[in-house]
Amino acid sequence: MAERACTRCNYVSFEKTCPLCGTETSSDWTGLIVVVDPDESQLAQELNINSPGRYALKVRKN
């Protein structure tokens, strides 16, 4: 099964709906950022990421 990314928050998982926000996920995504400590990460703050995890940089609806 291919990894999918949320069309709202960009969280990457194997689920058809996002485990963080419940939005539909897409298999059409590119780029990956891994956030370990969102409170200390300037990039996570800039991308509005509040939870640790793996996030896609660009997600297209399919």
Image (spheres, rainbow, N blue to C red):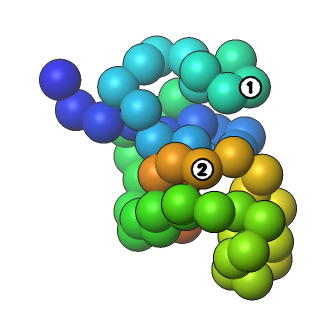
Q: Amino acid at mark 2?
A: Pro
Depth check, mark 2 against mark 1: the one in front is 2
Residue 30 appears left or right of 23: left
**Extreme-left residue of the structure:** 1
SS state under label 1: loop
Quadrant of the snapshot with the N terminus: top left
Q: Nearer the viewer, residue 29 or 13?
A: 13
Q: Percent from the top left, x then y, of residue 45?
A: 81, 71
Q: SS for tag 2?
A: loop
Label 2 belongs to which residue?
A: 52
Q: Residue at 47% across / 52% down in the picture?
A: 54
Q: Tell me which label, 2 or 1, sits earlier in the chain.
A: 1
1 is higher (above) or lower (below) than 28 = above
Cβ–Cβ below 8 Å for labels 2 and 1? no
What percent of the width, then of the height, locates residue 40? 73, 74
Q: Is residue 24 visible?
A: no
For disc 2, the neighbor class at 10 Å (few under 14, some 14 to 19, many from 20) is some
In the image, residue 60 lies at what x, y percent? 54, 49
Q: Position of residue 62 (x, y in %)?
A: 48, 35
- The residue depicted at 72 percent of the width and 40 percent of the height is 8
Residue carrying label 1: 21
Residue 13 is labelled as none
Residue at 46% x, 16% y is 16
Q: What's under tag 1, amino acid-wise? A: Cys
Q: Residue at x 59, y 21 (%)?
A: 19
